[in-house]
Image (cartoon, rainbow, N blue to C red):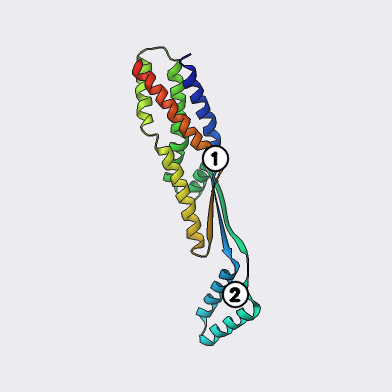
Amino acid sequence: MRLVLPIITILIALALLLPGVTQPVLTLEGKIDKSKLAQTGIEMLADEGDRNTSNMLMMASSMLGLDKLEGEINAYQKTRSIWGTVNELADNKNYLVAALVAFFSIVIPTLKLLMQLLYIFLPVNKFKHMLGQVIQGVTKWSMVDVFVIALIVVYLAGNADGQMGELINMHAELGVGFWYFTGYCLFAIAASSLIKTDIKSS
């Protein structure tokens, strides 16, 4: 009965990890105010001409009501999961970063949970003790999960800002994958705590 809780905790963590990696983590939307866009366009055109051209453009803008435009234009939208970010990084030839994100957000968490599950079912012997030490070593890297999510948020936000500059009004929304991944992190921490207690008592 003592083993039921850690087994359930590990299985829940594994079940949450898959959607946490494959479902959208973050959606970024960028909108541009129509009047600001028109004003910027006129200013750019005016910079190319002389003062008379600038005055004529400003006059035309007022006559056409371009300075009184209302509403926004959808200019940018990107939704990414952890796996989608890995693919995008690889497509952009950022192979090292893509490999690190995949390694620390997919490979290490999966291996750690599977090793913990194996540890529970093994009889007490030298191999189980060695596996326990490996699990303890891997658990020290648990905060990397959080770093991966932060890296993805910064990458997507920086990518959007680099493309659109100051004109765009950015809006970020956390996706369902973020909450799945957060749930995985919480259950993985609980599992590690239970396994650590078991390791110390063995």
Residue 169: image x %, image y %?
A: 53, 60
Residue 195: image x %, image y %?
A: 41, 22
Amino acid type at mark 1: Gly
Residue 144: image x %, image y %?
A: 40, 38
What residue does disc 2 label?
Answer: 67
What residue does disc 1 label?
Answer: 177
- Judged left or right of residue 133, residue 105 is right
Residue farthest bottom in this picture: 52
Residue farthest right in this picture: 64
Q: Nearer the viewer, residue 187 or 121?
A: 187
Q: Earlier in the sequence, mark 1 or mark 2?
A: 2
- Front disc: 1 or 2: 2
Q: Nearer the viewer, residue 1 or 114?
A: 1
**Residue at horizontal 53 percent and vertical 57 percent from the top:** 170
Amino acid type at mark 2: Asp
Q: Is residue 7 above or below residue 78?
A: above
Residue 98 visible somewhere in the drawing: no
**Residue at horizontal 46 percent and vertical 27 percent from the top:** 113
Which structural element holds mark 2?
Answer: helix
**Residue at horizontal 45 percent and vertical 50 percent from the top:** 154
Dot 2 crowding, Cα within 10 Å, few <14, some 14–19, many 20+: some
Dot 1 crowding, Cα within 10 Å, few <14, some 14–19, many 20+: many
Which structural element holds mark 1?
Answer: helix
Q: Do the residues bearing badges 1 and 2 touch, measured as CB atoms within 8 Å?
A: no
Query: How many labels, in total?
Result: 2
Q: Quadrant of the C terminus?
A: top left
Residue 198 visible somewhere in the drawing: yes
Which disc, if any, is residue 27?
none
Q: Is residue 18 above or below residue 153?
A: above
Residue 145: image x %, image y %?
A: 43, 38
Q: Is residue 144 above or below residue 36?
A: above
- Judged left or right of residue 191, residue 33 is right
